[in-house]
Image: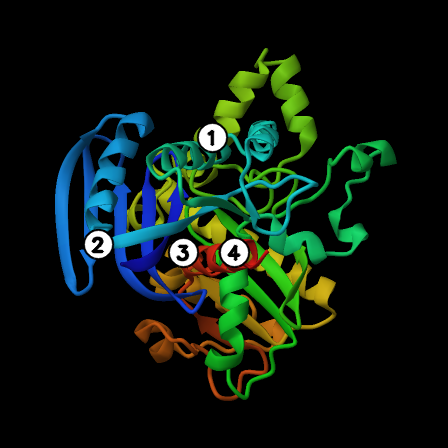
Amino acid sequence: MTDVILTLNAGSSSLKAGLYALENQRAGELLARFHLSAIGPDAALAITIGDKSEHRIVDAKDSDAAWPVLLEVITSALAGKTLRAVGHRVVHGGADYAAPIIVSETIRAQLETLTPLAPLHEPYNLAGIDYAGARWPDALQIACFDTGFHRSQPAKAQRFALPHRYFDQGVLRYGFHGLSYEFIASQMSSVMDGHPAERVIIAHLGSGVSMCALRDGVSVATTMGFTALAGLPMSTRCGDIDPGVLLYLQEVEGMSAADLAHLLHKESGLKGLSGMTGDMRALETSEKPRAKEAVEYFVYRCQREIGSLAAALGGLDAVIFTAGIGENSPSVRAQIANGLEWLGAKLDPERNAEGGPKISQPTSRVTLWSIRTDEEAMLAKHAANCLARETST
C-alpha cells in the first residue's frame, strides 16, 4: 500500500484537492488533482490523475452538495493507497494559531469563533475538516493557516491606532495569502538565481488580492489586515475604505451590519466599480468605460501599495507577480510595472508577453518576475511535517 497525503483548499464557489505520495516522511510526487468549480447545478469537475485528465459537469447546487461529489472521486483515486493525513488551508488562525496544527475537537471549536473575521472562507475551510474527518477518521486532519506567515512582522506593522486593550484582545493586522507567499519565498533563490532578493514585494493578484513585503524571505508588512477585506480592491471586495464611509452608510442610508457585510464582500471591488463583473479577464476585453475605469483603478492602487511597501523595506530589489491575474495577465502586469520606473523597474515587453519568469530588462535595477504559486504544495509539505512529528513521539 502506498502512503499518501491529501490537500484540501475549500472556498464558497470552488473546492480544490491534491493527492501526494508520502516518501520518507516527506511530501513527494503529485499523484492527482481535483477541482470542482462554479458550484451550482452545472458545476465543473476537473480530475487529473497522472497524465490523464477528465472533465465532467456535475450537479452540486451548493457547498454541502459539492463535498460528497468531490470526496467520492477522491475515494476512488485512493484505491490501493493509505491516506495518512489531510492538509487543510484555513484562512484565519487568529492570535493563537500560526504554525500548522493537528485539529482536535477543542481546536476545531476555537477556529469556528474566528468565522466573523473571514466569513467568505472560514466556514468552508472548517466544513472541509468536518467532511474529511468523517470520511477518513484514521487520517490526521491538519490546519495550515494563511495568517501564519505574517506573524513575523514587528508589532508596529501589526497594530491599529486604537487603545492598546484592543491589540491585547487580538484586534490587529493579521495578513492573508500566507501559504502562497511562503511558496514563492521558497522558490526565490532558485528562480532568481544571482539576482538581488533581500527586499522583495510579492503581488498576489487573484480573486483575492494582496501584497507582501519580504526582507530576506520574511514578511515585514502586508496590505491585508484584521480581515481579508483590507488593502487592495479585489474581485468583489472593496479593499481599504475610510471607516467614516461605513458610519455614513449606517447613519444616513440606514444600512445594517448585514447590509454592509454584503456590500463590502459581494458588491464592491472590480464588480462594484465596473457595474458588471469582478472577473478581470472580462474587464480587460470590455469596451465599456466603467470596465476600463475599474482596471485603471486596480492598477493605480497596486502602484500605490508597492510604493508604500517599498518604503517599509527601505528600498526594493524585486517585484514578483503571482496568482490568477499576476500569472496570466501580461496586460495588468505591464500597466503596473510601467508605473514603477521611478523605482528603477524596467519591463521587458517580450519577456512579459512570454510569461517569464523574469520579465524585466537586463538593465532594470529592480527586477520583475512572474512566478506560479502552489498553495497545495505548501499544504502537503506542512501535513507531512506534522505527521512526521506525531509519529516520532
Report crowding for label 2: few under 14, some 14 to 19, many 20 or more residues within 10 A (C-alpha): few
Q: Amino acid at mark 2?
A: Gly
Quarter of the rendering occupied by the N terminus = bottom left
Separation (CA) of disc 4 from disc 3: 22 Å
Residue 364 percent location from the top left of the image: 54, 83
Separation (CA) of disc 2 from disc 4: 22 Å
Q: Amino acid at mark 1?
A: Pro
Report crowding for label 3: few under 14, some 14 to 19, many 20 or more residues within 10 A (C-alpha): many
Q: Are marks 1 and 4 in contact (CB under 8 Å)?
A: no
Separation (CA) of disc 3 from disc 1: 19 Å
Quarter of the rendering occupied by the C terminus = bottom right
Classify mark 3: helix, strand or loop: helix
Q: Amino acid at mark 3?
A: Glu
**In terms of image quadrants, where is residue 173?**
top right
Question: Sequence order check: which comes first, mark 1 or mark 2?
Answer: 2
Residue extending farthest to the front is 393
Q: Are marks 4 and 3 in contact (CB under 8 Å)?
A: no
Separation (CA) of disc 1 from disc 4: 29 Å
Pair 1/2: label in front: 2
Q: Is residue 170 left or right of residue 66?
A: right
Residue 27 percent location from the top left of the image: 41, 64
Residue 31 percent location from the top left of the image: 27, 61
Q: Kindly identify which residue carries mark 3.
A: 376
Vertical arrangement, residue 52 with respect to residue 241, above or below: below
Q: Kindly identify which residue carries mark 4.
A: 391
Report crowding for label 4: few under 14, some 14 to 19, many 20 or more residues within 10 A (C-alpha): few
